[in-house]
Image (cartoon, rainbow, N blue to C red):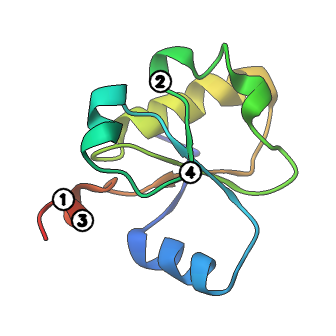
Amino acid sequence: MMGIKSIDLEELKQWEEEERSFQLIDVREDSERAHFNIGGEWIPLSEVVNQKNKINLDQPVVFYCKRGIRSQIAIQKLKFHLKSSNFYNLKGGIYPLLNH
């Protein structure tokens, strides 16, 4: 999707190591999160607009899902409602971590 900034797993790990301030949001379903997650706030894609008040616009916000598709959709929806340019999609999602 056009106009969406992305970050990959390696960059995310670097942000964490640098103790950079950011919010991490998992947009997957509850059953997926129960199976495996990398932390952060849980706001399923179907609720992302209704729960937009949980998003901290004062720092970068990284959205993730299994392969990075639903997180892009979440960002598109939120950009319409929140007008923020500080959203990042976790490129490729957490899928690479599921295979190790």
* Helix, strand or loop at mark 2: helix
Circles 2 and 4: CB distance less than 8 Å? no
| Residue type pointed to by label 2 | Leu
- Label 4 crowd (10 A; few <14 / some 14-19 / many >=20): some
Q: Position of residue 55 (x, y in %)?
A: 74, 37
> Which residue is labeled 1 in the image?
98
Q: Position of residue 28 (x, y in %)?
A: 38, 33
Q: Residue furthest front?
A: 34
Sooner in the amino-acid sequence: mark 1 or mark 2? 2
| Residue type pointed to by label 3 | Leu
Quarter of the picture containing the C terminus is bottom left
> Which residue is labeled 4 in the image?
40
| Residue type pointed to by label 1 | Leu
Q: Can residue 29 be seen in this snapshot? A: no
Circles 1 and 4: CB distance less than 8 Å? no
Query: Where is residue 33, by image quadrant?
Result: top left
Q: Position of residue 40 (x, y in %)?
A: 56, 51
- In 3D space, how far apart are the residues under numbered discs 3 and 1 (Cα atoms)? 4 Å
- In 3D space, how far apart are the residues under numbered discs 2 and 4 (Cα atoms)? 14 Å
Q: Residue at x 37, y 51 (%)?
A: 37
- Label 2 crowd (10 A; few <14 / some 14-19 / many >=20): many
Q: Is residue 60 above or below residue 9?
A: above
Tell me if 57 is positioned left or right of 69 in this view.
Answer: right
- In 3D space, how far apart are the residues under numbered discs 3 and 2 (Cα atoms)? 21 Å
Sooner in the amino-acid sequence: mark 1 or mark 4? 4
> Which residue is labeled 3 in the image?
97
Q: Nearer the viewer, residue 39 or 86?
A: 39
- Label 1 crowd (10 A; few <14 / some 14-19 / many >=20): few
> Which residue is labeled 2 in the image?
45
Sooner in the amino-acid sequence: mark 3 or mark 2? 2
Q: Residue furthest right?
A: 58
Circles 3 and 2: CB distance less than 8 Å? no
